[in-house]
Image: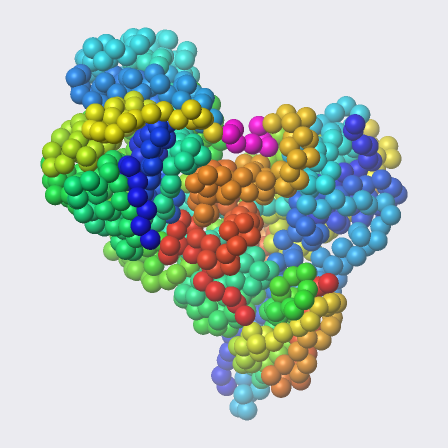
Amino acid sequence: MAENYELIVVGGGPAGMAAALEAEKDGVTKILLLERAETLGGILEQCIHTGFGLHYFGEELSGPEYADRFIVPTEQSSAIEVKLDTMVLEVTPGENAHQVLAINKTDGLLELNARAVILAMGCRERPRGALNIAGTRPAGVLSAGTAQKYVNMDGYLPGKEVVILGSGDIGLIMARRMTFEGAHVKMVCELMPYSSGLTRNIVQCLDDFDIPLKRSCTVVAIHGTERLEGVTIAKVDKNRRPVPGTEAFVPCDLLLLSVGLIPENELTRGAGIEIDPVTAGACVSQDRETKIPGVFACGNVLHVHDLVDYVTMESQLAGAGAAAYIQDRADKNPDYVGTHGKNGVRYVVPQRVNKHVTENVKLYFRVGQVYKNAVARLRAGETVLTQRKRARLAPGEMEDLTVTPEQLSLLPEGAELTIEVAEGK
Amino acid sequence: MTENYDVAVIGAGVIGTLIARSLSRYNLRVALLEKLHDVAQGTTKANSAIVHAGFDAKPGTFKAKYNVRGAAMMPELCQTLHVPYANNGALVLGFDDDDVPVLESLLERGRRNKVPGLRLIGKEELLAMEPNVNPCAVGALYAPSGGIVSPFDLAIAAAECAVANGVDFYRDFDVARINQHDTHFSIYSAAGKKRTAKLVVNAAGVHADDVAHLVGDDSFHISPRRGEYLLLDNTQAGVVNATIFQCPSDMGKGVLITPTVHHNILIGPSADDIDVKDDLSTTDPGLKGIQTTMRLSVPGYQIKDVITSFSGLRAHSNTGDFVLRPSLIDPRFIHAAGIESPGLSASPAIAAYVVKLFADVWEEELSEKTNWNPGRPKPLRIKELSREERREAIKKRPEYGRIVCRCETVSEGEIIDAIRAPAGARDMDGVKRRTRAGMGRCQAGFCGTKVLEILSRELQLPPQEITKFGAGSQILLGKTK
Amino acid sequence: MSERNFICVACPMGCELHVALDEKGGVAAVTGNNCKRGVAYAQAETTHPTRSFHSTVRVEGGNAPLVSVKSRAPVPKAMLMDCAKATRAAKAKAPIAIGDVLLADVCGTGIDLIATNRVS
């Protein structure tokens, strides 16, 4: 027998909790939050470093503290029912209600219905296989997040002499964590000529401990039969191909991979929801509604964020959007304008904006390379709607520009919003 | 401690395990000795996973005879053992006029080998069957009896069946010395453990010649020939339906692209004769080479969907054929050696033949067990069950309701089953092969820590002692504090 | 007059600060900052650099083997590794609430290490 909810939220990390709480605030009273782990909080639980919440709370919190600010109200809420250790297997969109199939130890198979669904499954790390590194396949090659779980949650050290491939934030953070736990981090290799991590993380996680960051450098071979014995690194040219003759052997017993995050969109794809090939997340409108009415997506499942503060804010939009949908307050005849990145802007989220909105809409975007003294412009055709000068734009840092309801209402038929970046003189 | 057996099978690859299973039918004391920590750790774990139709092998060889016979036995064997198998057919592509006589000679060979249904097809029929193959192909040899199978599933299932029927399975038993006595052999492991057996079957894969040397037999030589492979995500499923070969070369049957029984796409292998018998490294030129070669067959596959690469060793014998005979030094020592391609395809027939060789030499009474079970319990796969079946399964064991591997939808219950099974999983790779937890696109990023926890609990070992694939491959090096 | 360069870590902007030093090694002028936090950071980084510290402490009798901790305020940068050693030796007893002091005055810095998660 199918059980009915107004709203089902898939994922109990920062995105799912913020979305559910926002929906509750807007008057939704029957919400189910499904989380596959045994606790709420998602990946924040293992992110014990500080630096979370500067934007949203104006405080420097650790991951668990940031999560706790949402866990407490979620647990106390009378509108939100939480099921932990529960995996959603399928989301099937329907005309009047969407079906959610989930599974856990105590309820067995759950066949659920909801007016609206919010997808907040987060993201996962790219594995070694995706990189095609040659060599052997010994123990001692882990993704940085897996190592983070072992070290921060379980209290085990997966290696003592460490090389990190990829200078994404998790890799940088783990360089410092491994150092604090007594391991020797020999270097961080970055394929690109710049780091994809936040600058402050390079300073505080590498520079502070004299850990070299080798840019334009990669791991070309893995050595060791049972346990990792070392890696061969090499410089890469501007086409990211290893330069012959630059190879060097680095002895180590642990290789951590921090080579990118991928939104976890199996359920989204299974539901037939359109995916943006660049973000690898759903295409959404300003309230984070996918192309299927009543199905919303937010957080890292939509696009990979660098700061959880932005995840929270985005998820509140999704929660509010879902509430409006459930309460039949949503615009029945939206008039959408598409958004696009151009000239160095890789993507823009949301991918479309309803011209009938009554509040400002923030358009989030990422650039494809580092720009200095740059100007980011939002245009509609030849008209520049808004622009912002930035001393530095980097792929690792999400940016935003705002479009107003008035600007939207004045857009001619068939107009598109584009964001582009130009390097200043 | 010594334990005495009627027969010892050395090597728990697909050949050794199937032989042990076949021997378990009789009232015999059988030991299966494996050098490594699990079954299927050598050639069996990394090959093309193909059931060849049998048109390639030279007529009159063991390879030709047992390939066709083994391929015919495979569907029923896989059904009995609940091993995934599919009869997807095979195609050898021809790209120009030079290839046509090659295809014709393959057809002729195949007919002499009694391969069923073999025929040449034109471009139109080819493209209708496989819309994604290179439209430059002029035609193909079509072998409808070709198939795909999971080789490690087959070995795991065979070992499970053998052990359930009374075979003793010894892991980490690296045979280092064999003493010949009048009535038996004494077999010592490198660690000094001893087992005795009246007869020995040598199914030691790339090390079969080394094992033969232990009884003074140097009648054949095995050289390892490495093949590298790339595995693509199941998002690429459907890019080809049949197994697609190019015209064969001296080094092997050429690079192929094939679906796997687990809905991935496999491409490879490269072919390198190498010196070291345990060198399973992949190389940049090897991986690049197969990608380039493969573009000729199927130009449009998505290389960004590679989820892993690996390499395997084929046990190439200098005799050019399978070595299936008693040792010339001592007839009680039976070789099942040099089993390179089409060894997997031939394995059911090889096992049957080796049991016949055994019976010829065995001087005591040979009686069949009355309660022999040729199969094994069907592994429960939550992913494949209907809703009603899932409900029932979780009622019986709540752990089936706890999904550990997200990519492949594998439950804790399935992992527990794999560990508790006869000849069950003892390490992370063992769990991965038996349940597919960690086989998916995140490659154990999320489930690795949980699988380690379950292994630690089930085996009652501290987490630091849990390995990836046996001694020395520990995942964790100690506590942080 | 000498100069030092820092990358400001007060927020994710990562401003490149140029600090002109006076004869005594003090800060004479700061440029490159986008907000006043940059000046404060440059002052601190020049005279007494500090960092937030975080790690874990082993828990006895709780539902988790470890609890995460952070320094209530930044500690001297030079003391980070000493703090790390101190947490490796420390133990805490469950139950633990967020904000509980688990290591008072860590390594004589005058700063407490407090729990950043709950353990029951």
Foreground pick, B451 / B232: B451
Q: State the extent of the magenta-drawn residues as a range.
A: B377-384
Residue occupying the point 29% across, 56% down: B191
Is residue B382 covered in magenta?
yes
Snapshot quadrant of residue B260: top left
Q: Quadrant of the C terminus of chain B?
A: bottom right
Vertical comparison of A349 with A272: above or below: below
A140 vs B385: above or below: below
* Depth check, front residue: B96 or B390: B390
The residue lying toward the viewer, choosing from A121 and A152, is A152
Left or right of B103? Residue B3 is right
Q: Residue at x 25, y 26 (%)?
A: B359
The residue lying at 66 percent from left, 72 percent from top is: C92
Asked whether residue B160 is drawn in magenta, I would say: no
| Residue B284 picture location, percent across and down | 30, 44
Q: Position of residue A327 (x, y in %)?
A: 87, 35
Q: Nearer the viewer, residue A33 or C72?
A: A33
